Structures are given as structure tokens and as C-alpha cells.
Amino acid sequence: MQHLSLDIAQVLAGGLVLVSFMLLYQDRLSGLINTFALHAVVLTLSVAWQAYVQNAPHLYLTAAIALIFKAAIIPFSLHAIVKRLRIHRTVEVVGGIGLTMFVGMFLMGLSLVVMLPATAAADPLAREDLAFALAIVLLGLLMMVTRRNAVSQIIGFMSLENGLILAAAGANGMPLVVEISVALSVLVAFIVIGIFLFRIRERFDTVDLFELDRVRGERQ
């Protein structure tokens, strides 16, 4: 039974990494937002499984928060923002999709090489989750660096935070008050970022970061 629990946890965590690569591959905003919703659903399943295996009921609340906010409310709000601001639907990637995917695979390998030896003495369930979580965090950072559109960078930030939740859930969870605080902080950050997007679009008529740099005179 322990091996089955470990196998299912690895499949779910690995599935989350796979969806992170799907996020990197997306070149349209609608597809990117829908894939992020799938990312949140897989995170929900992974955290709920950790709650069952660890017999930690408070992790079910973490899973519910991820499902309600990240799989439903935030994707719905992002679709509304894109439609309201009439943002260009194609996402431009610095260096191209192929190079980004190659760098992503390198970061994935780096995460396994660094994290597995460093956590050799840890519980196998937490060990694998930490390695996958580091990969998800690095892939989220890669998305933030390589995307020119502010909305896609928000999604990169949210996927990065999903990796942190996976790590916390795998490492025998974290205090409930911390989980709720983190969830509320992310929601408040999303609201503030949404307001800034409206203001930026209203002021500069674009949310493309390269265009904003050009307006500021930092690019020709």
C-alpha cells in the first residue's frame, strides 16, 4: 500500500511538471489561461492525495482553496481581463518556443540532480515532491523571464506559487493559518495586478513589456 501511495503521489507531481511544460508551449493567451486552470486542478488532486496519505485534514482545505481560486475564479477573471482590455491574443516568447522548451528540460534535469541527493535522508514521499516542486518553481520563473505579455507573466508567477504549495504539502504540510494567509496574499496580489493592468492599458494602450520599455526610452 505504501508503494502504491508513493507511485500515485509521483504520478500527480510529475503530471504537474508536465502541465508546466504545456504552459511553456502555449503561444495563445486563451490556451495559456485554460492550461493554468488544468495546472490548478492537478495541484488540487496532488494536495488532496497528500492529505489522504498523511491523514492531514487541513490539507483538504488547501486543495479546496486551490480548486476554487486557481482553477475557477482566477482563470475566469483573466479571461474577462483579456476580453475587456482587448489584449492581443498571441503571446510572444523571447527566443522562441523551441529554445524555451530546451531550457525548461535543462532546469528539470538540474532540479532532480540537485534535490534528490540533497534530500537522500528524507521521507521518499517528500523527497520526490520536493524535486518536482523545485522544477515547477524554476519553470514558472522561466515563463516570467521569457514572456513579453504581462498577463502571461502573472500566470508564470501563479504556477511558481503552485510549486511552493506542492513542496509544502509534501513536507508534511504547513500550519493552516499559513496556508490561508498565503492563499489570501495571492488573491490580493492578483487583484492589485489586475488593477495595474487596467491602468497600464488605459495609459499606454498596451501591456507588452517591450513596448512599455520603448515608451520609457529604454529600447529603440
Image: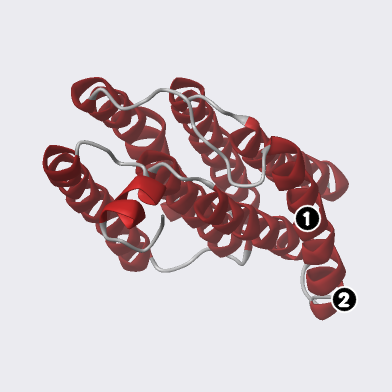
Residue 5 placement (x, y as % from top left):
77, 45
Residue 32 placement (x, y as % from top left):
50, 29
Q: Which residue is drawn at 44% across and 53% down?
A: 157
- Tell me the kind of residue under disc 1: Met
Give left or right: position of 198 versus 69: left
Determine which residue is flagged by label 2. Answer: 117
Circle nearer the viewer, 2 or 1 = 1
Image quadrant where one finds the N terminus: top right
CA–CA distance between discs 2 and 1? 15 Å
Image quadrant where one finds the C terminus: bottom left
Under circle 1, the secondary element is: helix
Closer to the N terminus: mark 2 or mark 1?
1
Residue 145 placement (x, y as % from top left):
54, 56
Number of other residues with Cα within 10 Å of mark 1, as a class: few under 14, some 14 to 19, many 20 or more:
many
Q: Quadrant of residue 155?
A: top left
Q: Nearer the viewer, residue 151 or 139?
A: 151
Number of other residues with Cα within 10 Å of mark 2, as a class: few under 14, some 14 to 19, many 20 or more:
few
Q: In which quarter of the image is residue 30?
A: top left
Give left or right: position of 191 versus 103: left
Q: Residue at x 37, y 25 (%)?
A: 88
Q: In this view, does 107 lie above or below 20?
A: below
Determine which residue is flagged by label 1. Answer: 108
Q: Which mark is residue 198?
A: none
